Amino acid sequence: MDSNIKAYLDLGIEYAITYGLKVIFFLLLLFVTFKVAGWVNRMIRRIVDKKELDPALGHFFANIAKYCVLVLGVVTSLGTVGIETASFAAVLAATGFAVGMALQGTLGHFASGVMLLLFRPFKVGDYVTVGGQSGTVKAIDLFSTVLDTADNKRITMPNGMVYGNQIENASFHDIRRVDVAVGTAYEADNDKTREVLMRAIKSEPLVLDDPEPAVTLNELGASSIDWTMKAWVKKENYWPVRDSLTRAAKYELDKEDIGIPYPQMELSIQSGSAATLPPQSPTPSH
């Protein structure tokens, strides 16, 4: 009996030493895995901050890297205690494939969101036109972009639609050109008209001297001579200056008696001899 107890004790001690060391090594690997994952997360956030990328993008990539390190570390740790990890990895791969197929459209919007945050064709606060919609950018998320229109409507657009369309960013440069179209009467002197329109531009103090403003003769229209007033302004002054230049043009043209004609059509009727109808035969009586 004593020999049996001693044998069981020896076997228990052997198992305790063998598996105890594996458990300790397993826990040690988990500890190192969590430390490395946290370090990777912080390092990516610092890189994103240094590169002045979008915080949302940095947060996303930092978390993705963290969870990748965690999954790799846990799978490796399980292998150290004798647990078969090949089937576990296959299940993870199959699950990832199934989720990817189910969320194919959503992942497309997500990929477009990543591209928008990486290449930054616009930022929050810019006035853009995308897919026929114009507005001020209020938010750029990983799946959608939010615009507020000039009449205070909110538009939420999937990022796939945003990135897949032509993007017009009116706020990208510090200055913009204001174009005001003006039509004048054919009776007006062209040189005088140009001088008057330029005076209207010069009357606006928010117009920049460099680049120089200009007045261009576009075409001889059906009812008017068509001009364009071109003035450069700071981007935040675009709409106020456009309004004031339109007002100034009307005021200066009226002061110089230069007409702004209405659409007209000339109708010419040529007189001629009246046509003679042939005599009609009398209707026979019955």
Image (tube, helix red, strand yellow):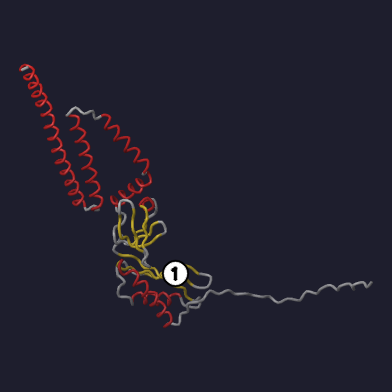
For the residue labelled by badge 1, is the local secondary structure a helix, a strand or a loop?
strand
- Residue found at the far front of this picture: 1
User: Closest to the observer: 241 or 202?
Assistant: 241
The quarter of the displayed image where residue 99 is located: top left
**Residue 240, x across and y down, in percent:** 34, 72
106 up-or-down from 153: above or below: above
**Residue 80, x across and y down, in percent:** 17, 29
Q: Is residue 226 left or right of residue 125?
A: right
Q: Residue at x 42, y 59 (%)?
A: 132
Q: Residue at x 33, y 48 (%)?
A: 110
159 up-or-down from 249: above or below: above
* Identity, as a three-letter code, of the amino acid under mark 1: Leu
User: Closest to the observer: 231 or 125?
Assistant: 125
- Crowding around mark 1 (Cα neighbors within 10 Å: few <14, some 14 to 19, many 20+) is some
**Residue 260, x across and y down, in percent:** 47, 77
**Residue 235, x across and y down, in percent:** 31, 66
The quarter of the displayed image where residue 267 is located: bottom right
User: Closest to the observer: 155 or 161?
Assistant: 155
Q: Is residue 264 visible?
A: yes
State the quadrant of the N terminus: top left
Q: Is residue 195 visible?
A: no
Q: Which residue is mark 1?
A: 217
Numbered disc total: 1
195 up-or-down from 141: above or below: below
Q: Residue at x 39, y 50 (%)?
A: 164
- Residue found at the far right of this picture: 286
State the quadrant of the C terminus: bottom right
